[in-house]
């Protein structure tokens, strides 16, 4: 059985964790496949968004216990190389040029929270359970910490990193880990369908540049003059590009932009 399913349907990429018997727990094989899937999708033309989801009862219940048992006996250097796989996976998702939408249900624990944090937009089922439980095992959420802190901030990260507690969906919404909370998977899928429809209406180049804009603001936050120059260059490029010209013309002519003609 393929541990990861990758499909492109109607301009949407679908990346589905497919280890339902173990609640889509992460091991070295699955992490490598997720990294490769998102790396390959960045080179696909015509994609408007990517959905990250999990088969079965849970989104992702963290690290696979058998894998953890195996790496526990490894040397420090071997554990370092193993950890790089998880770190690379998170960064590859974050740097995907298309909007990444997380469809979260059931459990999202440990490394699963890292996957959630790496998504751009997160729809979470109301009964979902999440938590950074690493400290209960004598570990820390090291490789996913940057993504999580970027999402919920340092103050809230202190609480969830240190407590090791599990939380419900409302807590995820309150902290900013999730953007919307939906009552039941039927409502979850209905809202996902609506969101994807809206994402497909946006300018393809503008959508990619919007993600780049976020990265620029994070990277050059302490260099305001550099950030000002780069953002001014970006909007100038947008306005001069055929896509920007079409978008502004459509606004003035009170019609939908024809992105496909560009």
Image (spheres, grey):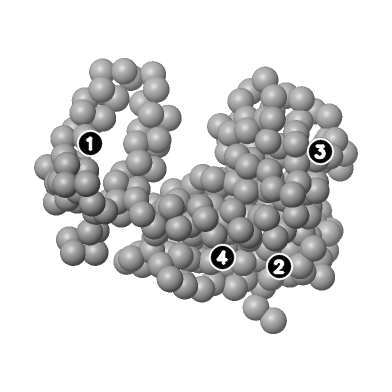
The residue singled out by tag 3 in the image is 167
Dividing the picture into quarters, in which one does residue 135 lie?
A: top right
Q: Residue at x 17, y 42 (%)?
A: 252
CA–CA distance in space, label 1 to label 3 = 40 Å
Q: Position of residue 136 (x, y in %)?
A: 87, 39
Where is residue 131? Give x, y as percent: 78, 41
Mark 4 vs mark 3, CA separation in Å: 25 Å
Q: Pointer 4 and pointer 3: residues touching (CB < 8 Å)? A: no
Up/down of 77 relative to 229, above or below: below
**Residue under circle 1?**
234
Label 3: few (<14), some or many (≥20) within 10 Å? Answer: some
**Residue 3 visible in image:** yes
Which residue is under mark 4? 15
Residue at mark 1 to residue at mark 4: CA–CA distance: 30 Å
Circles 4 and 2: CB atoms closer than 8 Å: no
- C-alpha distance separating marks 4 and 2: 10 Å
Give the camera-side residue of 45 and 239. Answer: 239
| Label 1 secondary element | helix
Residue annotated with mark 2: 55
Relative placement, left or right, of 208 versus 243 is right
Q: Tell me which numbered mark, 2 or 1, is placed earlier along the sequence.
A: 2
């Amino acid at each position: 059985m393929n541990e990861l399913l990758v499909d492109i349907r109607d301009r949407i990429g679908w990346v589905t964790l497919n280890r339902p018997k173990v609640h889509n727990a992460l091991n070295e094989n699955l992490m490598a496949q997720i990294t490769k899937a998102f790396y390959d999708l960045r080179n696909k033309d015509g994609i408007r968004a990517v959905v990250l989801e999990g088969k079965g009862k849970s989104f992702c219940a963290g690290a696979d216990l058998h894998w953890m048992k195996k790496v526990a006996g490894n040397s420090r250097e071997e554990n370092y190389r193993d950890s790089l796989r998880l770190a690379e996976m998170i960064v590859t998702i974050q740097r995907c040029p298309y909007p990444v939408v997380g469809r979260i249900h059931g459990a999202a624990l440990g490394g699963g929270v890292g996957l959630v944090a790496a998504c751009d937009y997160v729809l979470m089922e109301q009964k979902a359970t999440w938590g950074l439980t690493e400290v209960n095992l004598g570990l820390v959420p090291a490789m996913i910490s940057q993504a999580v802190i970027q999402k919920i901030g340092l103050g809230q990260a202190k609480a969830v990193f240190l407590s090791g507690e599990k939380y419900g969906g409302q807590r995820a919404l309150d902290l900013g880990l999730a953007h919307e909370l939906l009552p039941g998977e039927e409502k979850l899928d209905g809202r996902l369908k609506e969101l994807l429809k809206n994402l497909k209406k946006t300018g393809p180049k503008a959508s990619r540049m919007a993600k780049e804009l976020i990265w620029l603001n994070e990277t050059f936050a302490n260099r305001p003059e550099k950030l000002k120059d780069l953002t001014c260059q970006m909007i100038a490029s947008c306005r001069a590009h055929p896509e920007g010209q079409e978008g502004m013309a459509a606004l003035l002519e009170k019609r939908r932009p024809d992105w496909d003609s560009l």
